[in-house]
Image (cartoon, rainbow, N blue to C red):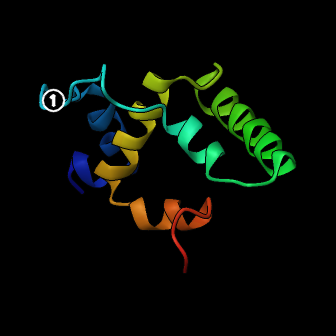
Amino acid sequence: MSDLASPIARLEASLSTKIGSSFNLDEVPDVIDLLLRSKRSPATRREYQKDLNKFFQAVAHEQPNRDLVLEFLQIIFRLGKVDEWSKSIGIQKS
């Protein structure tokens, strides 16, 4: 089995890859804010915020911020899990 076939090796390779200069990060919106604003109910927004905080605290040991979320999304894209992830958080209808 090659190193890149291992999920851990793929994850480490994704983490070491820099986000390209094609993106002006000053113009990238706050993804968490966009997600929360898409929910009409204030109670739903609060629960999503709590869940996001718990998730990022568990996996990254810090509260979510724009850069951390972009790093996470980069990993999701590189692993080819965009559809699964977006369905799981209700961005895309199944």
Quarter of image, res 9: top left
Residue at 61 percent across and 52 percent down: it is 38
Residue to which mark 1 is pinned: 20
Furthest residue toward right = 43
Position of the C terminus, as image quadrant, is bottom right
Front one among 68 and 32: 32
> Where is residue 29 drawn, in percent x and y?
41, 32
Query: How many circles with numbers are drawn on the protein?
Result: 1
Residue 89, how many percent across, how many down?
62, 59
Q: Seen in the image, is 71 located left or right of residue 32?
A: left
x, y (%) of residue 84? 49, 67
The residue positioned 43% from the left and 67% from the top of the image is 83
Against 84, residue 65 (above or below) is above
> Measured along the vertical axis of the image, is residue 45 above or below residue 94?
above
- Most distant residue in the left direction: 22
Q: The N terminus lies in which quarter of the figure?
A: bottom left
Give residue 14's position: percent from left, percent from top: 29, 37
User: Which residue is located at x 40 percent, y 60 percent?
Assistant: 82
Q: Residue 20 appears in which quarter of the rendering?
A: top left
Quick check: can you spot residue 46? yes
Classify 30 as above or below 80. Answer: above
Could you say which quadrant of the image residue 88 lies in?
bottom right
Label 1: few (<14), some (14–19) or many (≥20) C-alpha neighbours in 10 Å? few
Q: Which residue is drawn at 64% across and 21% down?
A: 61
Is 88 left, or right, of 30 in this rendering? right
Kind of residue at disc 1: Gly
Residue farthest to the bottom, as pictured: 94
Say whether residue 6 is visible.
no
Quick one: SS at disc 1? loop
